[in-house]
Amino acid sequence: MSYADTALPVNLDREAGTPLAVQLADALRVAAASGHLRGGDRLPSTRALAERLGVSRTVTSAAYEQLHAEGWIAGRHGSGTYVTTPPTRAAASVSPSGPPLADAETASSLDLSPGTPWAEGLDRAAWRRAWRAAADPDPLIRAHRAGLPEYRATVSEHLLRHRGLAVGSVLATGGTTAAVVELAAAVLRRGAVVAFEEPGYQRAVQAFRQAGLTVVGVPVDGQGLRPDAIPAGARAVYCSPAHQYPMGSRMSAARRVELVERARADGLLIIEDDYDGELRFDVAPLPLLAALAPDVVVHLGTTSKILTPTLGAGWLVGPSEVVRAVLAYRDLTGTRPSPAGQRVLVELARHGDLGRHLRKLRRELAERRTLLSDALSSAGVPVLGDDAGAHLVVLFESAEEEADRILAAERHGIRLDGLARHFAGTPTAHGVALGYAGCSREALVTALPTLVSLLR
């Protein structure tokens, strides 16, 4: 579909203090995120759009360049500029009858557990440059309890550009689990009930339990966590609405509204784990609960899945009373996130390396997911999970089958992650979560015939 002859949802305010190019980029980004523009839609040329809006071509070119850098649009030689999602490519070069793994030693490094980033895709020159630049400032003489100001500004820009969240303040954290520890200690009282996705992220479960909180599992289905199953009297609910971990579903719009209404009615604090929300391949990254209800949502993000755990850097955005409580806790305990990883992220963003890596990461993971899902589906193995993130799920009939398949894979030198460990209580679903980011593309291709045979 072409938008060259259709009105675009753009209104520029020449009296505003925001540059016209920024206004234009924001309007097109919102249109893409809301579905007004969809992947594959062709945009007007910069010249045509400039004439239509009555602005200089410099304005439209700058807006297009920004959106291209963020991965929202792409140019096709001789064809035009298109709203884009990362391309999926059929695995034509992979032979389903290819050779099995040569031996266990070759395959011993093939760990298909989820949660591992594509660290080999990091530009090593950019990585070294960022670390060198991070070492240039003078050593700190006092801690920044909220995080380095430049890091918080960088994260604010990242959230706006890549997650559509406009925030007034950001707290640096040491990552998602570290943020949960602080929330449990600073905001939630011992003995309080926390509703939690079942299955879900067990490190967070253990963090809550170690802080003396009671964790109660709430079932998830194809639309995400079920708000109607949240127990009465719960103080908080922990969820991953953009890409449920580990089952891979997205929380529907109706569920989001229902959850927010329940939170406001019952005084619940929603803890939104957006561990890989930047990694969608079918549509634009989904809107955040924090954007829908900033008064009751604490948003948690991390660099561990989009870059590497090496940085130990994450962020927290929440209501002012939550932020104050966390800062007071840091003052009492003398704790704060390490500034080293914060400085590195600032440098990666400053030179555009973060945006370039995200674009490359989306393309690579989209292709890997297609490679894996096509091979499994062609063999009659259904896969579960949205077209997003760095893992998918294959379900089995029983716990015994799950254990048998995992053991068989180990004999072939492949590590699989069973769903059983993602339940705090008795597992109600059986299968494996297949991560495809942590290994090399070559290792994944080589292992595919064996993997398909094991899961068929």
Image: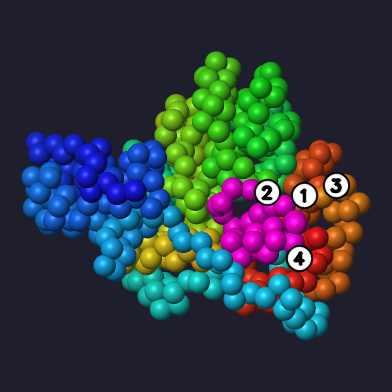
Label 3 near label 2: C-beta < 8 Å? no
Position of residue 257 measured from the top left corner of the image (x, y, whole percent): 51, 25
Position of residue 426 measured from the top left corner of the image (x, y, whole percent): 84, 39
Which element type, helix, strand or loop, lies under badge 3? loop
| Residue type, label 2 | Leu
* Magenta segment boundaries in residue numbering: 369-393
What residue is rendered at 67% in x and 76% in y?
A: 95
Q: Distance between the residues labelled 1 and 3?
A: 7 Å
Neighbour tally class for label 4: few under 14, some 14-19, many 20 plus, Cα within 10 Å: some
Q: Nearer the viewer, residue 199 or 205?
A: 199
Which element type, helix, strand or loop, lies under badge 2? loop
Q: Earlier in the sequence, mark 4 or mark 1?
A: 1
Instruction: Name the mark on residue 384.
Output: 2
Relative placement, left or right, of 261 versus 8 is right
What residue is rendered at 72% in x and 33% in y?
A: 219
In the picture of the structure, the residue carrying the numbered disc 1 is 395
